[in-house]
Image: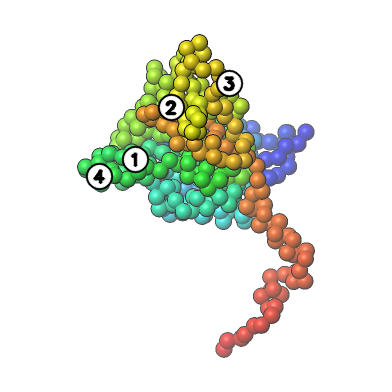
Amino acid sequence: MSVMTSGNLQTIAELPKYSKKDFVSNQTVRWCPGCGDYAILDAVQKSFATLGIPRENIVVISGIGCSSRFPYYMNTYGFHTIHGRAPAFATGLKVARPELSVWVVTGDGDGLSIGGNHLMHAMRRNIDLKVLLFNNRIYGLTKGQYSPTSEVGKKTKTSPFGSIDRPIQPVSIALAAEATFVARSVDVHGAHLRGIIGRAAAHRGSAFVEILQNCNIFNDGAFADVTDRKSGADHKVDLEHGKPLIFGAERNKGIRLDQNFNPVVTAVGEKGVPEEELLHHDEKNPNPSLAYLLSQLGAPDFPTPVGVFRDVQEETYEGAVHRQIQEAGQAGTVKDLNALLREGDIWEVD
């Protein structure tokens, strides 16, 4: 029996058998005690051990920020690049070495502020990159300034009277750019996060995962409504393909669309509407409109959706590049680069 791993055909017997410790580097992890990044690192290391991808075929690329220390703590290949430009470096690597599994680790500041344009174009090109965006709604590395995802009214060192910026919804940005895989998870929901990472790894194309992450020093409790063990079920809705959007500790609340196609929270069951009238999730829909609608839901009026918003298949960018190169080579008369450079009008400069 054979399987595809990172673009290469391998037999089951050849697949590497790893554990979490195989992905733990010899570097001391330097994040603040209690930071959500520790939980994410644990989930990634455990997930990578199950992928069946040779460790030397995995690359982790980051920009600048607390999250961007990630490559140092992963026993894989990696790049610690410049602010916001990790998707550009990752694009070049993936096109040159399409057999590699390339991961971009970024934050809400690095990825959505200075790096917003790079991230958007990587997603819309459908490059086979896996983007993990840690969203803690704050600039943590530079000690607590408001970020592109900070809520209106957020008081920080750079917004002492409260931020007046409307926040970006990371999942909405990825869907608007038509990334072919878009998901959201939570730092402390380990099993769920590992499942999402595994699905992102298996997807062929641009994969974007927003991870709600706590910064206990500069923005503690940013997503406490979702992570609270007692009340969290009332403040999040799990997206399951083909299933109705039902939530709540007693599974007695749901989301439907009214006659104007606006989402509405409603009671379900004997005291409410039947499940058939609820909005049913379809992650395979090639039209991202409903997924975008879901990405706009959140506190205080709606539960926060977690899970896979979109999972569709299209030709990857690097696949198209190499196909085009092959077709051009087969159709043309120029067979090598040296001949191409000397084709047509040329000049010699003394």
Where 273 falls versus 96 (above or below)?
above
**How far is disc 2 from disc 1 in space, using C-alphas?**
18 Å
User: Mark 1 or mark 3: which is in front?
Assistant: 3
Q: Which mark is residue 276?
A: 3
Name the residue nearer the viewer: 11 or 217. Answer: 217
**How far is disc 3 from disc 2 in space, using C-alphas?**
20 Å
**How far is disc 1 from disc 3 in space, using C-alphas?**
36 Å
What x and y, as percent, mark residue 157? 24, 44
Residue 66, picture quadrant: top left
Where 83 falls versus 17 (above or below)?
below
Can you identify the residue that label 1 sits on?
150
Q: Amino acid at mark 1?
A: Ser
What x and y, as percent, mark residue 290? 54, 36
Query: Residue at the spot x=35%, y=35% of the render?
Result: 215
User: Mark 4 or mark 2: which is in front?
Assistant: 2
What x and y, as percent, mark residue 320? 67, 54
Q: Amino acid at mark 4?
A: Ser
* Quadrant of the rendering where the N terminus is positioned: top right
Crowd rating for badge 1 (residues with CA inside 10 Å; few <14, some 14–19, many 20+): many
Q: Amino acid at mark 3?
A: Glu
Q: Residue furthest bottom?
A: 350
- Look at the numbered discs 1 and 4 and tell me whether their residues touch, using CB distance below 8 Å: yes
Q: Which mark is residue 222?
A: none
Whichever of callouts 1 and 3 sits on the residue coming sooner in the sequence is 1
**How far is disc 4 from disc 3 in space, using C-alphas?**
46 Å
